[in-house]
Image (tube, rainbow, N blue to C red):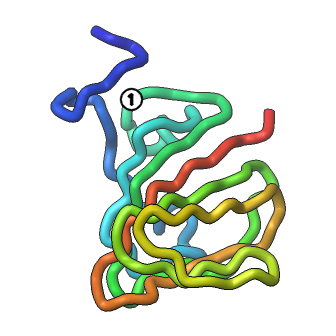
Amino acid sequence: MQKYIRTPDHDMRSGQISIAELHPDDHKDQLASWLFLGPDVIHGKFNLGNMVSKRLEISVDTYTPDGYTEEHTHPDKEQAYYIVSGQAKATVGVEEGIVGPGGVVYIPLNMPHGFANAGDEPLTVVVISSYEL
């Protein structure tokens, strides 16, 4: 079995998690969260058994038209959002903007941030997190 490469048809390529269980006060109206790579504490909690990383976490999250995240911070990781489809109203610190497909949002360590689906369609975002060691 390959340890570092997963094809889309591999049975251990990803695992669907409930982000509400990890962050119940921050994320609202999420349709799905597929975790592809991440730290042991998350993989162990959800019995994902797929690729484990000490620094990186990658997921694809989809929100309903009413979906959003409350403004929050991460003391242990930087993040970047890549918008796959839909429109996000993103806030990072004092910056605010509408970001569509192909757009990127960067969130530094400890920076207040949040987003809301700004459209009538589901919003799909690739979330990339880099943990501090």
Horizontal side of 80 relative to 29 (left or right) equals right
Secondary structure at badge 1 equals: loop
User: Is residue 97 at least partly visible in the picture?
Assistant: yes
Residue drawn at x 36%, y 76% as measured from the top left:
86
Examine the rendered structure and indicate whether residue 24 appears above or below residue 43. Answer: below
Question: Disc count in the image?
Answer: 1
**Residue 112, above or below 131:** below
> As drawn, is 97 to the left or to the right of 35?
right
| Outermost residue, left side | 9
88 to the left or right of 76: left
Q: Where residue 29 sits in the image (x, y, percent)?
A: 39, 80
Instruction: Give 118 or 69, whichever is nearer the viewer.
Output: 118
Q: Quadrant of residue 7?
A: top left
Foreground residue among 118 and 12: 118
Which residue corresponds to mark 1?
50
Instruction: Report the quarter where the C terminus lies.
Output: top right
Q: Residue at x 36, y 51 (%)?
A: 34
* Up/down of 45 relative to 67, above or below: above
Which quadrant of the rendered structure holds the N terminus? top left
Q: Residue furthest front?
A: 102
The image position of residue 44, as x and y in percent, is 48, 36
Q: Residue at x 59, y 75 (%)?
A: 26
Q: Is residue 122 above or below residue 54?
A: below
Type of amino acid under label 1: Asn
- The residue at the point 68 percent across, 42 percent down is 130
Quadrant assignment, res 46: top left
Find residue 53 and report its horizontal and vertical position in percent: 58, 29
Query: What percent of the width, then of the height, locates residue 16?
Result: 32, 51
Answer whether residue 25 is visible to the viewer in this image. Answer: no
Mark 1 is surrounded, within 10 Å at the Cα level, by few (under 14), some (14 to 19) or many (20 or more) other residues, namely many
